[in-house]
Amino acid sequence: MPQAPLIVFVGHDAGRTGAPLSLLRIVEWFANSTAHPRAVILRSGGPLEAEYAKYAAVHVWDQPYPAPLDPRRLFNKALRRLGLVDMALLSRHQASIVRGLLARNVGAIFNN
C-alpha cells in the first residue's frame, strides 16, 4: 500500500503567540487523526520547536550566518526582498530542505 502524501505546514516562527499556537494545534490534529506524514517549515525557531517536533519533522528556514555583516547575507537578503531568489541563491541549509521535500510525495502545503 502506498504511503499517504506528505503534508507540509509553513509558519513564521515557534513563539508562544496566537498563530504559532494555532498552527501547532492543527499539526497535532493531523498527527492524531490522519495517517499523513507531516513536515513543518518555520522561518525562525522558538520555544515551541520541541512541541512541533512531537508531531512532525521540523525545519527552521533561517539559520544564522557565521557573521552578521557577511556580504553574501546582505546580497541574498536584498534579492529575497525583491523576489529574485532562486535555488542557486539559497543557503546550503535551505537548499537541503527544498531538495528533501521535492524528493517526497507532497500532497498539500498549509501556509499559516
Image: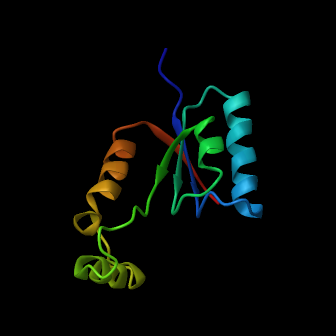
Q: Residue furthest top?
A: 1
Colour style of the rendered protein structure = rainbow
Q: Is residue 106 above or below residue 19?
A: above
Query: Residue 53 sits in which quadrant?
Result: top right
In the displayed structure image, the side of residue 28 where residue 61 appears, left or right: left
Q: Nearer the viewer, residue 100 or 5?
A: 100
Nearest the camera: 45 or 81? 45
Residue 28 position in % (x across, y down): 71, 38
> Which residue shows up at 38% across the image and 85% down it?
82
From the viewer's perspective, tell me whether residue 95 is left or right of residue 24. Answer: left
Which percent across, then down, holds residue 67? 30, 74
| Vertical relation: 35 (above or below) 58 | above
Query: Looking at the image, which residue is at 32% across and 73% down?
Result: 85
Residue 35, percent across and down? 62, 25
**Residue 25 figure quarter:** top right
Q: Position of residue 54 (x, y in %)?
A: 62, 35
Residue 91 image-quadrant placement: bottom left
- Quadrant of the image containing the C terminus: bottom right
Q: Residue furthest front?
A: 67
Q: How many marks?
A: 0
Query: Which residue corresponds to the image point at 72% horizontal and 59% vertical from the top-left?
Result: 16
Query: Which residue appears at 69% of the width and 36% of the height?
Result: 30
